[in-house]
Structures are given as C-alpha cells and as structure tokens.
Image: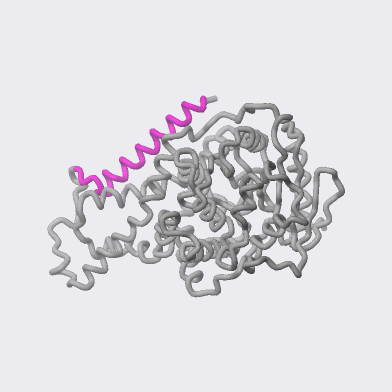
Amino acid sequence: MLSSRTKHTLHCCLFFSLITAFEVFTGGARIGDFADPSAGIDPWQQYGVLWTIVLYGLRLLALLSLPQVLFNFFGLTLYNAFPDGVQLKGSPLLAPFICVRVVTRGDFPQLVRRNVQRNLKRCTAAGLENFMIEVVSDKPVGLAPDRRVREVVVPSTYRTKTGALFKSRALQYCLEDDVNMLGDNDWVVHLDEETLLTDNAVRGILNFVLDGKHPFGQGLITYANEDVVNWVTTLADSFRVADDMGKLRLQFSMFHRPLFSWKGSYVVTQMSWERKVSFDNGPDGSVAEDCFFAMRAFKEGLSFNFIEGEMWEKSPFTLWDFLQQRKRWMQGILLVVHSKVIPIRHKLLLAVSCYSWVTMPLSTSNVILAALFPIPCPPFMDFVCVFIGAVNIYMYVFGVMKSFSLYRFGALRFVLCILGALCTIPFNVFIENVAVIWGLFSHKYRFYVVSKELPATVTV
C-alpha cells in the first residue's frame, strides 16, 4: 500500500501534467504547432465594434473564477491531500463538553432516528465521554429515550427578533436562554440530518476543541460512501470534495478566515461565540444561513481552522433535487453578497466567486463563440483561461480519487469512476446554468429540503 506522502506526490505529478498538457495542446502556452489560431484576425474589422466588445467582455467574465481556482490549486498542492488517519493529541476525558446538534424539519423521522443511533455509537466507540446528541426539529421525530440524546421541538409560534426563517429560526431557538443547556466554553458540532460521523472526524473534532485556538472549524465531507443511490449526482459532487480539500482547506489553514464562506454541515463552533454572532439575521440570512453566519463571524474578526477527518453524506437522489439544491445555494449566497449588513471588504472574494456563478450562462457561451468567432487575446489571458479550465476538470478527477478506494473498487472500476465523473461535467454545467437562470427570476425566500430518505423496499 502506498504511503500518504507517495499518494500526494503522485497526485501533484498528475495535476501538473494535466495542466501542462492542456496549456500545450489547446494553445494556451502557444508552443510550436499549437500557436494561437486567431493570429492575423482583426476582430474590429471582421466582426464590427459592438460584437467585438461583446466577445472580449464574455472572455473576461471567465476570469471571475480565477481567485477560487488559485485557492483550489494551492490548497490541493501545498497540503497533503491524502493524509493518514487522525491521531488523538490528548485524552478524550480532558475534552470540553460537545453537543452534536442536528437540525431537521422532521419530514424524515426514520432517517433521523437511524443516524442518531449510528452517530451515538460512533462517538462512544471513539472514546468520547462529555457529549450529547441534540435533534432540533419543527415536528416530533420520536427519538428513543437516552441520557445522551435530547429532542427539541421548535414551537410554531416562535419568532426571532429579525424574523429569521427556516433553519436559521431553529438554530436561533436553541440559543434562547430558556432552551439552551450549554455553557460558554462548550462546543457545538452542527450536522445535517443525513450526516454521519466517522472515527477520524470524531478524533479531528477532539483535537480541534482540545487545541482551543479557534472558535470555528470545518472539515471534509465525502459523498460516495456505503451504497451509492444516484451515480450521476454522486460523481458530479466529486467536485465538492476537491473544493473542500482545496479552497476550504487553504482559507482555513493558512488565512484562518472564511474568505469564500463555508458549508452548513460539519460546522464546529464554541458556544459563547456562536451566541455572539447569532443566527438571527432576518430573511436575507435565512436561505444560506451558513454563509451569512460565516460572514458575520468574519466581520467580528473571529478565526477559523480546518479540521482533519471526514464526514459522510449522500448526494441528492434525483436530478430534480440536485437542481433545486444548486438553485437555493445560488439564491442564498446572492442575498448574502447583496446584504448591507456585511461590509464589502469581508465579502469581496465571496462576491467575485458568486458572480462567476451568476454569469455562468454568459461565460459558458465562450465554448461556442470562441470557435465561431476567434479573437486574438494577450498570451497571459489565454494561459490563465486554459489554467482555469484544466484545474476545474482535475477537480473531478481528484474528487473521485479521494472518495473511492482503489483497493475496494479495483483498477478497472476506479478508472471508470474517473471517466464517469468527467462525463458528468456537461451535465453539471447544464444544471448550474439552469439553476442560475431559474434562481435569478424566481422567488428567493424559499428553502427546498432535499430528500435523503431511501424509499422502503416491499417484498412481494
């Protein structure tokens, strides 16, 4: 079996080789026979002034994604992308109290009950002593009585001061004085209803809270564990795995700030600072409550860190859910970017990233327009555009390598998974474009809940 360092070295070699090949064979580096095909074309004369301005404007839109691409590139290369298992750096007996909090609407009670029991056993097996699992729901889910499990039902009459909605409303209810049972030095691990802990994640969280240098932390989530329900959405989500190990890891490990925000699950917070930042952020902070919370914490000057160890989730089971999920994310982040509560200096990179997403239908058109209407561009611009494309394509390859085990699947199936992930790129681009267009012109204050409950099998 290859060592951790060897895996990372091979991954870097593959990454650099792919980028080099793209730069050479697409003409980005303009070497030899692969020189610029638009050389000698005068677009102002051939296409006219207006159309030339449009073509150059569309080409420049592709550069909006450069900041996050650079973060992904350096995050995947500067840090070991295939670390060994997490080793405890202190005794679990000395760890502060940890509350594993699951927020749910209560539509899938069987899923919640099953995952609570699995996570309870995982925490106990990992040696965790000072902990409990708390489920916060809009309706009862019928948890079995246990001294380490607490069920909190949010009253339908509850209203926050700013009118927070959906998950934000439930999270804020937990912070009310007559509901909260935690002390200022206790820690909360926020999970979605389908999120499963692993031994490495529990040890990583223990190391994080024992260290105590940062009030907020987050780690990696993978989506191809146990039974894969929908191969298309799971392989498409391999990009998100690479995004966690690249952009998310770099911003937290090097800068300790949520420069591009963070996810809504596998969130670890210290109670005193969670109450100070608050989830009571009105309707604008309720669609992407995780993003708004991170930006407010950033505004307060609070620090973040990356937590070693992965958690498990499932990709959406249907293409419709996949589309709805992306639409809500885009709408929620756009509301955060446009919020006057967050100063521009704190959300600048988030805004650039968001608008690279919002303008995706326009930038995608470059694929066709570049072939039909070639225009001469500065060599550096061509190089950067190809670099962006190469890194984004490799993200799918890395996501598969990180999610699927070569030893478990075998070489043939492993390669097929990589090829399958690459084949989902056109699908993913199409879904993202539809989500953007639909999201821009539809109601933004809705919270679509993706189903993660498998239908019961019936024996006939």
- Residue 180: percent from left, percent from top: 74, 52
Secondary structure mostly seen in magenta is helix
Q: Is residue 29 above or below residue 152?
A: above
Q: Which residues are magenta?
A: 3-31
Q: Quadrant of residue 118?
A: top right
Q: Is residue 184 magenta?
A: no
Q: Which image quarter is the N terminus in? A: top right
Above or below, 126 relative to 350: above
**Residue 417 visible in the picture:** no
Residue at position x 15%, y 68% in the image = 44
Percent x, y of residue 271: 66, 47
Q: Is residue 24 magenta?
A: yes
Q: Which quadrant holds the C terminus?
A: bottom right
Q: Specify the quadrant of the image occupied by residue 130.
A: top right
Q: Is residue 20 left or right of residue 262?
A: left
Residue visible at 53% across and 31% down in the picture:
83
Viewer-nearest residue: 133 or 234: 133
